[in-house]
Image: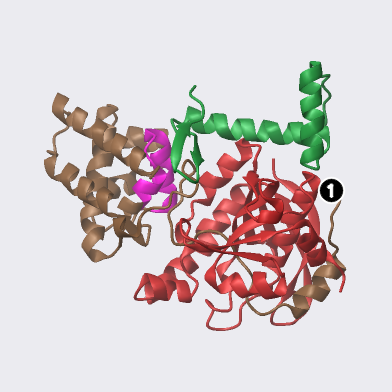
Chain colours: A red, B green, C brown
Amino acid sequence: MKELLRTVVLQNRGSKKFEEAQLYRELDQKNFDDFERLWRPMLEARRAEFESWAAAAEGDAQDSHWEWAEKAVDASTSMADETYAIECAGETQGLMLVTSAAFARLEAQRGREIVYIELIATAPWNRPRLMKKEARYKGVGRVLIAEAINLSYQLEFNGRLGLHSLPQSESWYREVAKFTDFGYDDEKRMQYFEVTEAQAAAFLADD
Amino acid sequence: MDRRQMTLMLSDKEMTLLDRLSQARGMSKTALVRQALRLYQSVTERLENGEKVFVEKPATKEKTELMVL
Amino acid sequence: MESKYTNDWLRRKIADDPDEDPEAGPRAIPVTSRARYGIAHPESFAVAGERTGVPLRIALGVLVRQLRSNAGLSIAELAERADVSEEDLRRVEHDPHYTARARLIHQLSSYFSVSLTMLSQMAGATHEVDRVLFNESVRFAARSDDVSRLTEEERAALNAFVSLLNERAKV
């Protein structure tokens, strides 16, 4: 059952003002519909403009074939998976899928339970690289990562996380969040990051 | 979150194991049992889908099938 | 539920964050629910385009027609049971230039228990196309005759193709 977890804030990039947004656990038809009707056409349109797959990646328009409905339905029956949605101004602004059936690779916490973030996506209209004019909201990624840390604490994993980063997000994880860059994962063809308990606490700290 | 209660009867050995695991993994016994449940579902679901679960020795790449339903 | 972060924290941090929101997870890889990170080998995919679009949609049309026929249903009956429009169904079956909408594909996938990912690729809804799917689809469509009732042989070929699709989706 879709459940309102809390009210959060996102920054309106145009006005610079912060607007209230709703953070939900579990998705419902509205989120699937938003993905199909609002996200996908924009991604398809942009993708059609690029000549190659690599160019599409550069321009940030690749994820139109995620089958969110299937994934979310599976997540609702599997105890280890959780899905999240952020809604603002009546539209789905961000989506996340995580699993708790995952274990750390980092030597310092090898084998310990982690919340593994399978997917974080912000709506296409929120992405500066995709939008030729100004993108709409900022902050979806930070909210979702913070919420993944919440879940990690809730499960008594003390904030430990793992994720595979999109190329253009690597510097954020490395420099802004100061997570550990574990290196390139040959199998997934992406950079793998892990978050220690100390890093999770530092991420949430007030400074 | 709705909560329901269950009384769990464990042998001495099982209780010792639960204590040891929860200590080693830095989680309360309840949290550990919940995680065990999630993992159990995760593994058995894969088996039910016809997938196989293997354990691999990194040094030799030798694989053993973990469980068969 | 208790939170380790506050909205004040969000306000402060988001304002200072760089422009681009961080994201995670695979983008360029079709994911199915069964094989979570079904990492397909790069060589097994081709970029979809006009070259692949029409033959795949022809094969999709044949597949839907045969599945329907095998179930002993008319277009009207299938439309009703799968909760889709007759018009859309007719076009999927007969018009190789028609791009079926996501919902139609979803309903058919559900009704006939055929992989959604594979049907989406056949309908032209994805950027990349599995080469094996492409080759097998073309072969499947070429072998089929447009008759109202399936022969024993055709039924076997239909079942084999559907199994292939569902197996391939796990790769």
Please name the residue shown 18% across and 42% down the image: C140
The percent coordinates of residue C54 (x first, y second) are 22, 58
Q: Quadrant of residue C164?
A: top left
Residue lying at 48% horizontally and 61% vertically, measured from the top left: C27
Element class at badge 1: loop
The one of A207 and A130 positioned closer to us in this rendering: A207
Q: Main secondary structure of the magenta part?
A: helix
Q: Is residue B1 visible?
A: no
C10 displayed left or right of B43: right
Q: Position of residue C50 (x, y in %)?
A: 24, 65
Q: Nearer the viewer, residue A28 or C88?
A: A28
Residue C105 shows up from this direction: yes
Q: Residue extending furthest front?
A: B59
Residue at the spot of label 1: C1
- A59 to the left or right of A202: left
The one nearer the camera, C13 or C108, is C13
Q: Chain of mark 1?
A: C
Q: Is residue A43 magenta?
A: no
| Of the pair C171 and A91, the residue shown nearer to us | C171
Report which quarter residue C9 is drawn in: bottom right
Q: Is residue A71 left or right of residue C124?
A: right
Read off the magenta span: C101-120
Q: Residue at x 63, y 47 (%)?
A: A28
| Magenta-colored stretch includes residue C104 | yes
Q: Quadrant of the N terminus of chain A?
A: top right
For the residue marked with disc 1, what is the amino acid? Met
